[in-house]
Image (cartoon, rainbow, N blue to C red):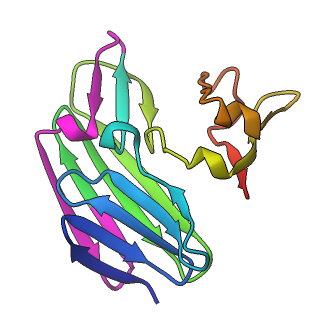
Amino acid sequence: PVKFAEKDGLLLVSNEYYEAAFDASHGALMYLKDRKTGETLSTGNRDHHLWWAILDDQSSLNSRASRSFSYEWHPSSKELTFHYDGPLKVDVTAVFSKENRFTLQAKIHNASEKTVESFRFPYELNLPTDQIRDALLPMLPGVKLNDRFFKDQNSFEDQYPGVLFASYVAIRTA
């Protein structure tokens, strides 16, 4: 079963496989844990921003700078929805299924005069680098980063669409 609880300023959503904690004041992911092993899969978003938008004049908007934030738990559909208001109106839905799956989806309405050039969601997830064995980047002919890349505190950023042919990265942990 999927469970929801509010505790110590966190919104906790879990199923048999995962537990996610979101900040109740602005929706940032604070952690994602594997419930079977107790392993922390992510220590949340960089600087506690769930999303970040880059506009055509190189200015930016982000989840913590929204005019208002609210959330709703929908027990029948097992969905947690975040609502952000401002020049970008963003609705984020977190869904835990009975299967081994957790998904996030963002819907954006741009009420500003500017064009959104990039929308980063979820924004820069922090991973416990000591547990990463390797990572596969969606580039042709293919790029596989070994554990040394992460242990040395390196980072990688590129454009999708463009150099990257998909907006994902596959990470294998110990």
Residue at image coords 46%, 57%: 104
- Against 25, residue 109 (above or below) is above
Segment colored magenta: 56-81
- Against 100, residue 44 (above or below) is above
Quadrant position of the C terminus in the picture: bottom right
Across and down, in percent, residue 161 comes to 63, 26
Question: Which quarter of the picture shows residue 142?
Answer: top right
Residue 173 in the magenta stretch? The answer is no
Residue ranking furthest to the right: 141
Residue ranking furthest to the top: 57
Residue at image coords 84%, 27%: 140
- Against 79, residue 67 (above or below) is above
Image side of residue 25 versus residue 53, left or right: left
Question: Which quarter of the picture shows residue 92?
Answer: bottom left
Image side of residue 166 versus residue 143, left or right: left
Residue ranking furthest to the left: 67
Whether residue 137 can be seen here: no
Image side of residue 158 versus residue 32, left or right: right
Say which of 168 and 135 sits in front.
135
Across and down, in percent, residue 71 comes to 21, 63
Residue ranking furthest to the bottom: 1
- Number of callouts: 0
Residue 60 in the magenta stretch? The answer is yes
Residue at image coords 51%, 62%: 103
Whether residue 164 can be seen here: yes
Residue at image coords 39%, 80%: 77
Across and down, in percent, residue 135 comes to 74, 42
Image side of residue 156 versus residue 84, left or right: right
Across and down, in percent, residue 7 comes to 22, 74
